[in-house]
Amino acid sequence: MDLRLSGKIALVTGASVGLGREIAIRLANEGCQLIILARREALLNELASEIEASGRLRPLVVSCDITDRQAPQKVLAQVLAHHGHVDILINNAGGSRPFDGLGTLAQWEDAMYLNFHAARELAHVFLEGMKERGFGRIVNITGGDEPVAMNGGVPPNGATHIWAKALSRVVGQHGITVNSIAPGRIHSEQIDKKLLPTPEAQEKWVAANCPAGYIGEPDDLAVMVAFFASPLSRYITGQVIYVDGGARHASH
């Protein structure tokens, strides 16, 4: 299927490793001109060289900490200087924040800014340009909102889903869609090194939780992202899609 993404300008945050890296590669293979953003510049340059070596245009590398309160304006300035606009924003940066106890105010503020406010602020700075062109795609990579422990990374997922739904109703008339994708257990730096660091732990988790019978690969998520980024998905907005092998218990 031709997703009609050739020539679209796409910004992917958290692109240096794992899910963000795979999303960037998938979008590049679909013909997007990429801007890849993360803190680890060396890893971003490696990815840019890999994409260029595959015959695609070299991505613009933006080394940035999205929790810097000035980051949205700095990123906007770099993007405008190099490309003039962004068609597609993939808000992928974020991370789990498990607490030993209830969590301090500082811990909660850190978790909320990283996993909610930073993506929201970044989206807002690109909206006017999307409105002017009558096209935009905002895709938020979030996570589950079924809390099983005290983790500061979970409530921001719910906040993002609600904000994205509200935003979709405001900007839909301008040809802009806003959707969220909540990955389950997918092989990544966070899953393979922190959450389920051994084959035995992964097998045990799959047996107890995942009807599909395996932990997903990054491209299982990336293909969904590419579809939401496509002009073909124009009538899908304000939605939350779970890419988790059926692990989520609730039906909605």
Image (spheres, rainbow, N blue to C red):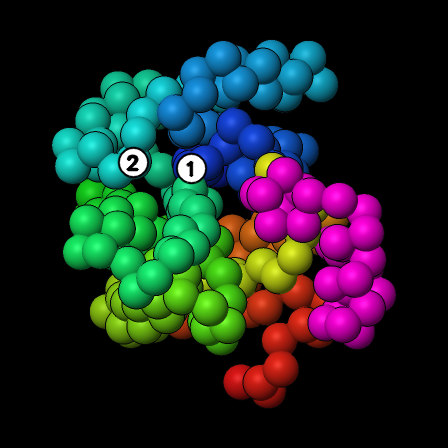
Q: What stretch is highlighted in magenta?
A: 190-216
Question: If you read the primary sequence from the N terminus, does the residue marked by circle 2 or circle 1 appear first?
Answer: 1
Q: Is mark 1 on a helix, strand or loop?
A: strand
In the image, residue 177 above or below residue 69: below
Observer able to see residue 211: yes
Q: Residue 66 carries which label?
A: 2
Residue shown at the point (59%, 20%) measured from the top left: 47
Q: Is residue 95 left or right of residue 201?
A: left
Q: What element carries label 2?
A: loop
Residue 195, how many percent across, how many down? 60, 50
Q: In this view, does 223 lie to the left or right of 178?
A: right
Q: Which mark is residue 13?
A: 1
Residue shown at the point (69%, 43%) measured from the top left: 197
In the image, farthest residue toward the front: 101
**Label 2 vs label 1: CA separation?**
8 Å
In the image, residue 126 above or below residue 174: above
Q: Are marks 2 and 1 in contact (CB under 8 Å)?
A: yes
In this rendering, which labeled residue sits more in front, label 2 or label 1? 2
The kind of residue on which mark 1 rests is Thr
Say if the magenta span includes residue 214: yes
Q: Foreground: 59 or 250? A: 250
Residue 82, how many percent across, how many down? 33, 19
Residue shown at the point (26%, 29%) measured from the top left: 75
Residue shown at the point (62%, 61%) measured from the top left: 184
The kind of residue on which mark 2 rests is Ile
